[in-house]
Image: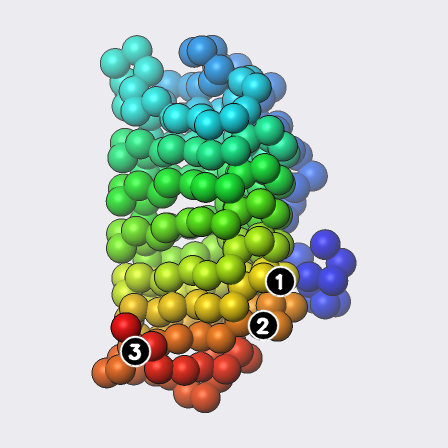
Amino acid sequence: MTKMFSGRSKPACAATWLLPLLLLTLPGTTHAQFNYTNSNGAITITGYTGSGGAVTIPGAINGLPVTRLGISVFNGCSNLTSITIPNSVTNLGEWTFAVCTSLTNATIPSSITSIGCAVFYQCTSLTNITIPSSVTSIGELAFADCSRLTRITIPASITRIEDRAFSVCTSLTGVYFQGNAPRVGLDVFYFTTDATVYHLPGTTGWGSTFGWRPTMLWNQ
């Protein structure tokens, strides 16, 4: 972690790193391999008790919609290889899949509007991720230390990318933006030294660099 912050203070959400899988201890109910709570008829999954592999989040439990994955639900689940999230889910908690070092593929549904802080932090096997056009913001450290991620497409819906969102993505060579340049925080591509930012002709807000990385026209 030290190299990532370069002497700056850690983001506010980093405090949850001190409490990995804390929500497993909260009172709730168990369904198959998930712990959950029910709030006003909506289910929040608070913990995972399975053995990993390819995991599908249920769209409903006991007839009630699963709408949220809580903080750190899969944090440190080193045997998780892929995750499928249903369209009922509208919110991903901070550090949801952090340090899932065997996770290679994740499906983000079109019901998600933001990718929060450190959701995929240090998913060092992640090679494929599709961000739907419903997403408008990417949070701090969201994909930081995803060292096998080589390419990512940013939909035109994205208007904000927070601090260090793609930092230390050492294999990332192409970041492809489908819309105008979004607002960016500090050190978005910190230690991501081989990345080139591609943007479409006719889009606005681009200079010779973006987030300190060189830019090029993306001729599809």
Quarter of the image where the C terminus is located: bottom left
Secondary structure at badge 2 equals loop
- Picture disc at residue 170: 1
Q: Position of residue 193 (x, y in %)?
A: 61, 72
- Picture disc at residue 194: 2
Q: How many marks?
A: 3
One can see residue 171 in this view: yes
Secondary structure at badge 3 equals loop
**Residue, far bottom:** 208
Secondary structure at badge 1 equals loop
Task: Give the Cα separation between the discs numbered 1 and 3.
Answer: 24 Å
Task: Give the Cα separation between the discs numbered 1 and 2.
Answer: 7 Å
Q: Position of residue 90 (x, y in %)?
A: 32, 38
Left or right, 88 with respect to 52, comes to left
Q: Position of residue 182 (x, y in %)?
A: 37, 71
Mark 2: amino acid: Asp
Against 171, is 119 above or below?
above
Q: Residue at x 52, y 68 (%)?
A: 173
Against 217, is 63 above or below?
above
Q: Are marks 1 and 2 in contact (CB under 8 Å)?
A: yes
Left or right, 204 with respect to 51, comes to left
Against 216, is 30 above or below?
above
- Picture disc at residue 219: 3
Q: Residue at x 59, y 37 (%)?
A: 102
Q: In which image quadrant can residue 78 be found?
A: top right
Mark 3: amino acid: Asn
